[in-house]
Image: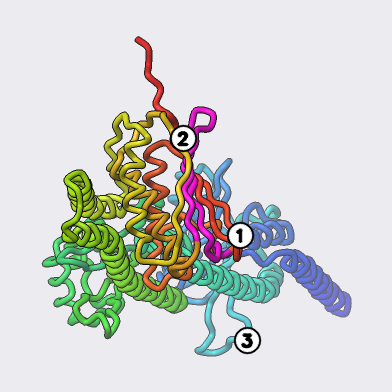
Amino acid sequence: MKEQAGGNLRIQLAQKERELYSIQKIGQALSNTLKLDDLLNLIMKEITEIMEAERSTLYIVDHQRNEIWSKIALKAEVREIRQKFGKGISGWVAETGGKLNIPDAYQDSRFDPSTDKRTGYRTRSILCIPVWEPLSSGAQRKMVGVIQVLNKKAGFFTDGDEGILEAIASQVAIAISNAHLYQQLEKKFREIDLLYEFEQQLSSEYDVREVFRQILDRTVRHQAGEFAAVAYPLNNQVNLISVSGSGQTDFRSIPATVYKEIYALSGGNMAAGELPPGEMKKLLPEVSEVQSLYAKIIPAEPAEEKRMPAIFVFQARSPELRETPDGDFQFLGMVEQKISRALELNALREALLKQERLSAVGQMMSTVVHDLRSPVNSIYGFMELLLEGDNTKEEREEYAQIIRMEIQSITNMTSEILDFAKGKTSIIPRKTAVKDILKRFIPETEQLFRQSKISFRSQGESQKLVYADVDKFTRVLYNIAKNAKEAMSNEGEFYFKIYDDNGKVVFELSDTGPGIPEEIRDRLFESFVTSGKKSGTGLGLAIVKKIVDDHRGEIEVKSEPGKGTIFYIKLPEYVQEHV
């Protein structure tokens, strides 16, 4: 009896030593990784060796779907397998929470031999036990996994094997829980990174369609969804932007009547899952009735009462909406807020753009009125000369011709400014003698400075021909002279010089004004850049630059604070082509 008792004690001691060794070995293995996919392979490799079995499988319990799942390696591919509660040996354990030790699988009615028939594998003995969540007990116990071990190499599994596997299961439970926590933490970090990226996009990308495309694409990929979409009603139609799980993007318009019908069915306050997918298909034909749907109404801002709200839709791959974890709903809610912000910023930008357009129109009108003063003043001045009565016939004809040209200049000026605003080239160049340009420019400029204390001097001549639009080019010279007069406050000197230089005719215009401020010197010919002029709009020199460019000419400026400014305009001389 003593010898028998001693033998049993030694067996028990050996079993305990084996259990401790197994727990130590599996614990070391589990501490090497926190990723669940790697964990499954690592655990089963160690369990198979410790249990002296042919195969082992660790199933993770999915309570939302009433399934257990695992991943198995088949040749060169890794395949996920899923099994419903109650089906097969492992499914029975998952459903009941009991353990099974079966010496002969084919003698147990719960065994499903279909896998053996399909793969050619022969299952003999099975040991299958549940894995319980750490620190859970009693009715509150929650199963997190099922371990199934197949075919003991030396016969069938013993009570000692059961004890070892149960001891290992407690370690496995801790490892699975840690892996789940790691996955959740990793996902939260990814979500934080995504939300940060979305916020950056809102600040840097002004195209609302592109903002939506990027947000929807990243959301679908992060959530492993089927597709996501934003329906945004505007101007009696619905702008629809959708991105599929494969990355395909679709932009299209839908009649507003369809959207209004969906909005009415939702009661104007749609919550996740409240609207049947069949109704949503009217708005989004790609919606599947067997997949879960997250749809939310995004109300318009109070200031935009006439603007209808938008709808954000996300479709998951799971068959029931309630299967989507609460954390996913929270993330989708935050995505919804980013979409709302994008719509709000887009509305603000539209309002600002309208205001800027109105301002630009006002500036353009100011320029037109401002530029009209010069020819009107010129007409007024020559009309006074005509009324003096002591003019010769030649002088009266000269003054009348100038008046006609100024009236034509007014007509052309309005078209010129409007064409400039539209980016059009409107010059009509012809072969022209330089002296014909001077006949227009010199009298106009003399009249400009007549009522001021500015002395006007001109020097030089040119016998060259240029290819130019006389009316437009005269406006260039006159505009610079007018700017000089305003800059000098009606007191100073304006000097005009013309000369030929290496195949070009140079028009030099200088003044003794305060010079061009350094801060705008590099942007002098840009639109709306002005300085020191009460009525200046900053369009005059921009128009000058465009007209010179249209003539294939060059314009340069030199300026020194307190000493004045010099403009150099160079036109290529006209060369007669020989046939």
Q: Quadrant of the C terminus?
A: top left
Q: In which quarter of the image is residue 462?
A: top left
Residue at 50% over, 33% down: 500
Structural distance between the alpha carbons of marks 1 and 2: 25 Å
Q: Is mark 3 on a helix, strand or loop?
A: loop
Q: Which of 485 and 291 is in front in this view?
A: 485
Q: In this picture, is 563 found above or below 322?
A: above
Give the mark nearest the N terminus, 1 or 2.
Answer: 2
State which region is magenta: 493-517
Q: Which of 473 and 116 is in front in this view?
A: 473
- x%, y% of residue 493? 49, 59
Image position of 214 (left or right of 101): left
Residue at 44% over, 32% down: 572
- x%, y% of residue 401? 20, 46
Give the mark nearest the N terminus, 2 or 3.
Answer: 3
Q: Which of marks 3 and 1 is in front?
A: 1
- x%, y% of residue 460? 47, 39
| Residue on which the image places disc 1 | 560
Q: How crowded is mark 3: few (under 14 residues within 10 Å), some or many (20 or more)?
A: few
Q: In this picture, is 127 found above or below 398?
A: below
Give the mark nearest the N terminus, 3 or 1.
Answer: 3
Q: Indicate the amino acid at tag 2.
A: Val
Q: What element carries label 1?
A: strand
- x%, y% of residue 538? 41, 63
| Residue on which the image places disc 2 | 505
Q: Main secondary structure of the magenta part?
A: strand
Q: Is residue 496 magenta?
A: yes
Structural distance between the alpha carbons of marks 2 and 3: 96 Å
| Residue on which the image places disc 3 | 135
Q: Indicate the amino acid at tag 3.
A: Leu
Structural distance between the alpha carbons of marks 3 and 1: 84 Å
